[in-house]
Image (cartoon, helix red, strand yellow):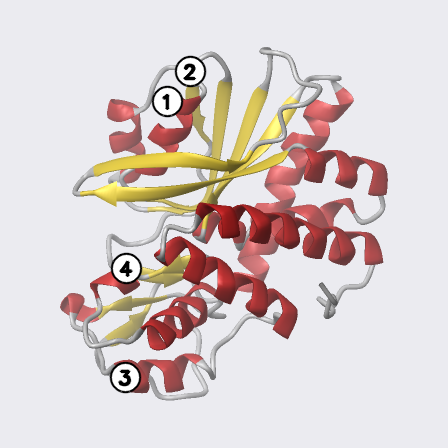
Amino acid sequence: MIEYPFSMPPEIEPVEGMAHLREHLTLHGEMVAHRLRTLHNNHEEFRVGIALMGAAVPLPYILKCFQSEPELAQQILDRTFFLTTSKNGATASGQIIRNPNAGFTDSQTFIYPEDILDDAGTALVFGELFPDQQVEVYPAFHKPHSLEQAAKVLLPNVSVHPFEEIPKKWVFAAGMDGGTPRLTGLDEFDRIELALLQRFSRHGYAYVNDNNPPHDKLISFLKQSQLPTDPELRWIFTHMERAKMHGNLAALEKLSSEYLKYIRAVTLSRNDDLHALKL
């Protein structure tokens, strides 16, 4: 078990299998990148689907694998679309907000990198939106029940390619916000800040018995445990969180395009450190 250099609130605990998330997301990115490179080499059409907000976090780790292949990196970015998802009870729904249709036929493979496969709701949305295409889901994490649940609910055109199983707990980090909307007593600023801190946490944590620590204590703790990200990336995510919170799809579409500009600059810079991008 990793030795954490700081004390954590008693309401949360580290999650086995989520101790070294930068390394884990790097390996997950390499797995997805290998599949994209294979499709490209086989001259097969493909697109990359990203569900906001959590699935946007693994995307830079995927594109980093193409730093020495700028033309292929550009193709992947050009073929990336975004959708926003929401849940009403156990039912998930989604709406595409950026859809690069030009130049594609009906014969395609959709690659869907995901932060976590839990109840397979978002994967089901992808399958329903594109019933005539093959949808390949690549979750960085899944829970013990997830694969069985996916086999029950997903359409035949959807396949899941799991990477790492974690315990069935209320988890955050690696793109997951830990169910921030369930937390009470937060104003909009605190909710957005806490969502970002959870998504970009360097280590994975879970709530103990679904008990929520005071948000100021949790925010203070999470500021000590962050993946390396620059201020410009956090600026984009801050506004994306707010746009999604208010259902502002026009703003979310514009910001998703800005996010791709950011990733393009990082990918093609051949610089291992994420650098600030002036938008």
Q: Are marks 4 and 3 in contact (CB under 8 Å)?
A: no
Residue 3 lies, with reference to residue 81, above or below; the image says below
Measure the alpha-carbon separation of dots 2 and 1. Answer: 5 Å
Mark 1 neighbour class, 10 Å CA radius: few under 14, some 14 to 19, many 20 or more: some
Q: Disc 1 to disc 3, how far (Cα)?
A: 41 Å
**Marks 2 and 1 in Cβ contact (< 8 Å):** yes
Q: Which mark is residue 128?
A: 1
Amino acid type, callout 4: Gly
User: Which amino acid does the dot numbered 2 rest on?
Assistant: Pro
Residue 42 is left or right of residue 55, and the answer is: right
Of the residues under marks 4 and 2, which one precedes in the sequence?
2
Which element carries disc 3, helix, strand or loop?
loop
The residue pinned by badge 3 equals 9
**In front: 241, or 250?**
250
What residue is shown with label 4? 179
Q: Position of residue 181 (x, y in %)?
A: 26, 62
SS of the residue under disc 1: helix
Percent x, y of residue 150: 30, 30
Calculate the distance from the C-alpha at mark 1 to the C-alpha at mark 4. 24 Å
Going from N to C along the chain, the mark reached first, 1 or 4, is: 1
In what quadrant of the picture does the C terminus appear?
A: bottom right
